[in-house]
Every structure is written in C-alpha cells, then in structure tokens.
Image: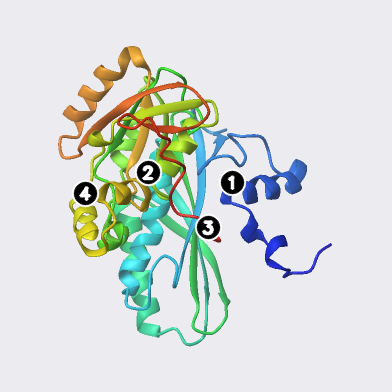
Amino acid sequence: MGALTTQPADSIAAWDEEEIIRRVVQNLSDAAPAFPEGPGGDCAHLPNTETAGWRISTVDSVILGRHFDAACSGYLAGIKLVNRNLSDLAAAGATPSDGLLSLVMGGEISQAWLLDFAHGVGRAAKAAGLKVVGGDVAQGPAQSFMATLAVQGFAQRVLTRRQAQSGDVVFVTGQLGGSRYGHHLTFTPRLAEGAWLGSQSEVTACTDISDGFSKDLTNLMGPQLNLVLDERMLPVSEAAMALSKADGIPALEHALQDGEDYELLWTAHPSRADWIASQFRLKFPQTTLTCLGTLQVGTGQIISQATGKTLGKKGFKHFG
C-alpha cells in the first residue's frame, strides 16, 4: 500500500492516459472483463439478453476549471455533459437509452446556476431520447463542481476504434480545430450519422475526436498501422484560422491538436469505401465528409505526405 501523494517522479503525472488505464485495469484483475465487454474503448459493449444487438455503456464528466470556466452558464455546462457522452455513443453506432447523473460540488455553488445546469442536462437528454433515471449528490471541496453522467444505449453490432485494418480508408466528418471559440460548448453529437455508420458492415472502425485529431487517429490506427496524410486535405475550421491569427500558431496545428471537435473519425473497407462515402453524403448532405487516405502496415505513425516526417501523437494530455 502506498501513500495518497508522493514525489513527482512517482506520481501519476509520469504516466499518460493510456498507461493509467492499463495499470488500473491490470489491478482490477478478474473484475474487468476482456474488451469489448470491458475496458479498452470509449464504450463497453455488453450482449443484450433481451433482443438482438448490444448494450453500450459509457461515462464522462465535466469539471469546473477543466471543461468549462466560471463564466460559463450552467445551461451550457449541462448540455456539454450530455453531449460528451452522446458523442461516445455515436462513435459506437448506438442509440441512447438511459443515464445516471452524479454531482460533486462545494456548498458555495449558486442555486440558480445549479438549476440552470439541470435544465441544460434535461434539454440535451430529451432531444436525444435519453432518460436520466437516477444518480447521486455529494459535497466536494469549496468552489468546486464536477458532474458525471453514466449513459447506456443500444447498437446493432460491435463498432469500436480498435477494428481498423491495413488497406482501410479513413474519413472524418465536419471541420477541425479552434473548438475553444465556442464549439466545445455548442457542438451537436453525430448521433444520427453514427447510428447509420454502425448499420453499415462496410464501416470497420470508428471513434470521436475529443483529445485531438492526431491523438485520436493514432488510437484508431493502433501500433501496427500508419497513415500518410496530405495535410492539405485536412478540413480546417474557420475558428482554427481565427485562432491562428490571434495566437500565431498555424491553423493546421490547431486542427491536428486542439481536441473537443466531437466529429467522427472512421474507416471503411477499401472495396466499398467510395460507395459508403457516396451513400453517407446522400444521407447527410449537411454534414461534410473528408477522405484522408489509406491505412498501411506500420508502427502507429501519422506521416506527412509533404515532408515524410512523423506528425506525432499530439493532443490533450491528462495530468500534463
């Protein structure tokens, strides 16, 4: 047994998110079933004993000072909590069902702000057909607020970020970068698109972009695949361009690294990639779709087509 806190070299700050998860799951031992029923993706996939298909479970949080600041309305913070979870369900091709809401907060939190937060949760949940069926409330440190939502849904099949293979073609929806200019609070999860992708056997893997395009793409590829990326094809948002003018960082870097885009990053079997892309565009004409290239056997690298250099696994770093 160890002490709660320790010196920096022995603290969890020395591990990245993947290492933290690996170590925790290892110590859960037999209590953690094997992927995809257990840890390893953004959602757990559990056999549905009542009807065909799978029960999909996920959980996510919003924390004051991390996912929103004190200037954010309770309403938008509540919407963000729900939509972060729904984006994970979308990547699993799932339809939402029910959820449990947990609140940990300091006693100084405004009554009006809390009720505004609940209103945002309720509005976003109702719009998606999600029922909030229970939860928990606990007192936290002064001036703190953390809300966690555990959500369940249903999907026709297992669709995760760990199923991509060499030769698969990579696609991404929407535009990327500059989410801090408001998109991280006002995005719409791609539930309809995700459910449709999940119903298409030609779609081989899928994830949502929360930690940054390059980091989430690396997770999608895994350690045995590469993507040679023509950066000119990357759909850079107007917000990323505006942010670039403000901070001097190239808009492309914002598109690669910023995170909280909540777009879908997915792969399709090479023999059917053109067909599935054309069908997607017919089904969702308001959602832009960009083809980014073909996965190759490799070592988990994103390689610039222009320079031949590795772009690296950049993006949001927990405990960084």
Q: Quadrant of the N terminus?
A: bottom right
Give yes or no for contact between labels 4 and 2 (Cβ–Cβ under 8 Å): no
Q: Residue furthest right?
A: 1
Dot 1 or dot 3: first in sequence order is 1
Residue 305: assigned label: none
Residue at image position (52%, 45%) is: 57
Residue 18 numbered tag: 1
Q: Position of residue 73 (x, y in %)?
A: 31, 74
Q: CA distance from mark 4 to mark 2?
A: 13 Å
Could you tell me the amino acid type at mark 3?
His
- Mark yes or no: residue 225 visible: yes
* Displayed quadrant of residue 186: bottom left
Q: Is residue 94 visible?
A: no
Q: Label 2, secondary structure: give it.
A: helix
Disc 1, disc 2: CB below 8 Å?
Answer: no
**Foreground of the two, 283 or 247:** 247
Residue 136 in which image quadrant: bottom right
- Residue lying at 69% horizontally and 50% vertically, measured from the top left: 24
Q: Residues within 10 Å of mark 3 (few under 14, many from 20)?
A: few
Q: Are marks 3 and 2 in contact (CB under 8 Å)?
A: no
Q: Is residue 279 above or below residue 173?
A: above
Q: Earlier in the sequence, mark 4 or mark 2?
A: 2
Q: Badge 4 is on which residue?
A: 237
Apparent side of residue 28 relative to residue 78 in the rendered image (left or right):
right
Numbered badge on residue 318: 3
Mark 3 or mark 4: name the one nearer the start of the chain.
4
* 173 to the left or right of 301: left
